[in-house]
Image: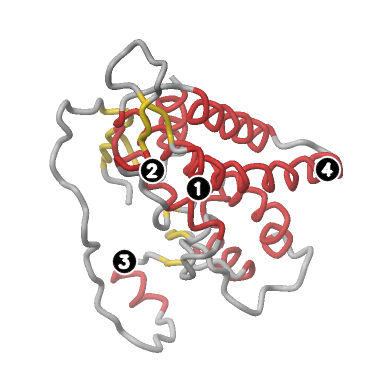
Amino acid sequence: MASPFHLGAITASVSTLWQQTFISKYPHLAAIQRKPTNPNDPLSIMWWNPTLFDFLPCPNSLVVGLSQLNPARYKDLYDCQCELNTRIHAYMLAAEKLSILIQNLLHTMNHSGVCICSLQTTFLEMIFGVTEFQRYFLKVLGLINFLEIYKPHMQRLAPHATSAADCHGAFTNNPQFAQQLFDAGLLLYLIWTHELVKANNPELLNFVLYFMPTNLVHTEADPPFPTIFEGSTMDYKKHASIHNYSRT
């Protein structure tokens, strides 16, 4: 987990697709919601991939090749955005101390929403814009859920959760972090070396085999995307680099 890590810009959305290393500076990443199993769930749009059919030419455009996102698809995204904005503003009004992180994420989510609604772009840029909005939305949703639902459990301000949340969770090698995630009902993977397992002799209920993820793209994009971060996966700067890249 401490080995060098290379992150290209094209892989920046992975932080909302599966569990991440638990980082105390960004604990809400453990509360990122999983894709709904019901395709009719309004939130399913946040895992939608645009196609050429969603790329509508602008009749009055003076530049060939630029188009806009299908208004019907944008409305699905916008409806979710409005509902989340209402919830965030209610939280801010009641909060004794405002979170700088939630203000920054909310601003960038709304800014990316304006871009995909108003700008004429190439198809590749439209895909990037939609993905950026989806990622920010899921992070804002994960953050408000963490603050309102899971953090009280982790701080023992509420009894420990009795059921598992439908979130990606996180993995960690810190037993204290693992206990906090367990108290909150968030999925966790405690990573221990073989030596630690032997020394602590925990009660192991079952052994399972790990499996490699499928459908991953291992080839370079053409043209190639720049490297935006290189370092440890446990370094919070990895996520800061994703934000900085997409905003600039």
Task: Work out whether mark 3 precedes mark 4 in sequence or the reverse, and give the earlier one.
Answer: 4
The mark lying in front, picked from 4 and 2, is 2
Secondary structure at badge 4 equals: loop
Q: Mark 2 highlights which residue?
A: 13
Q: Residues within 10 Å of mark 2 (few under 14, many from 20)?
A: some
Residue at 27% in and 34% down: 8
Q: Residues within 10 Å of mark 3 (few under 14, many from 20)?
A: few
Q: Report the amino acid beneath label 3.
A: Thr
Q: Residues within 10 Å of mark 1 (few under 14, many from 20)?
A: some
Query: Depth check: 223 or 191 in front?
Result: 223
Tell me residue 31's x, y (percent): 56, 57
Tell me residue 117's x, y (percent): 52, 30
Q: Quadrant of residue 157?
A: bottom right
Distance, label 4 to label 1, CA atoms, is: 23 Å
The mark lying in front, picked from 3 and 2, is 2
Task: Work out whether mark 3 precedes mark 1 in sequence or the reverse, and give the earlier one.
Answer: 1
> Compared with residue 16, is residue 241 higher up or lower down, i.e. above or below?
above
Task: Work out whether mark 1 precedes mark 2 in sequence or the reverse, and give the earlier one.
Answer: 2
